[in-house]
Amino acid sequence: MSSGFHPFGGRVSRRFGDKSLHPDDAYLSYHDIRLTVEDVDCIKNDWLTDNAIAFWEEYLEHEKLNAYPKARIVLLRPSMAFMLLQTNDPMSLKSALPSFEHTTHIFLPVNDCRDVETAEGGSHWSLLLVSVVDGVAFHYDSLCPSNMEEAKILSHHISQLLQKPLKFVNLDDSPQQENGSDCGVGSHHRGGSEHSPFSLSSPKSKSPPRIGDD
């Protein structure tokens, strides 16, 4: 019988330490996400793949968001955010995306890849938080202003989908990385730390309003 701390309470299928695995083999499965050996190797080398970020979002949905029952939060997967960034017709993707009808906040990972032919492309991650209830899109970038243009385009496209104008706010006071590899962890750590939009409480500041049931 296994012992010790398990962060997922046994809700995963895992193959830790199996030396026979190939890069595309499953390393860990959690609900709808299947992390591969390559994903884990990239994490060890300080880069988050699309799939690793999708895993983090899946974890937040199942383990954290139930603490905010009055919020209607959508964590858009990297692949969906990339499609939305690249399209010239956001409405054409409506059927492929989650319904935003009653959504209060949307979290979108932003990548600087512009080549639709390149899988897992790009070199920098940031985070766009759309507060639908406030009509504002907040952009967190740990290497500001690297992803400013991509975030503005994404904000415009999500505005078209929502059929609601959004004010774009680049958060110049976002904590900045001190190396070339912390962007993914830095951007998506916002969803589960003391710097998280879930715990900020000043609606009159440039930072997002509190997301919760207070």
Image (tube, helix red, strand yellow):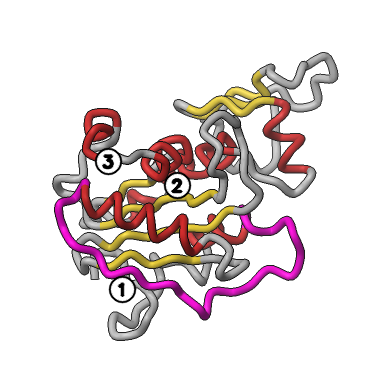
Q: Is mark 1 on a helix, strand or loop?
A: loop
Q: Mark 1 points at which residue?
A: 209
Of the residues under marks 3 and 1, which one precedes in the sequence?
3
Rate crowding at label 3 as few (under 14), some (14 to 19) or many (20 or more) other CA atoms within 10 Å. some
Q: Distance between the residues labelled 3 and 1?
A: 27 Å
Which residue is rendered at x = 58% and y = 70% of the image? 144
Rate crowding at label 2 as few (under 14), some (14 to 19) or many (20 or more) other CA atoms within 10 Å. some
* The quarter of the displayed image where residue 48 is located: top right
Furthest residue to the right? Answer: 19
Image quadrant containing the N terminus: top right
- The answer to whether the residues at label 3 and label 2 have Cβ atoms under 8 Å apart is no
Which residue is rendered at x = 21% and y = 50% of the image? 160
> In the rendered structure, which amino acid carries the disc numbered 1?
Pro
Mark linked to residue 90: 3
Which residue is rendered at x = 55% and y = 69% of the image? 145
Q: Main secondary structure of the magenta part?
A: loop
Q: Mark 2 points at which residue?
A: 60
Of the residues under marks 3 and 2, which one precedes in the sequence?
2
Residue 47 shown in magenta? no
> In the rendered structure, which amino acid carries the disc numbered 3?
Pro
**Image location (x, y in percent) of residue 12:** 56, 28
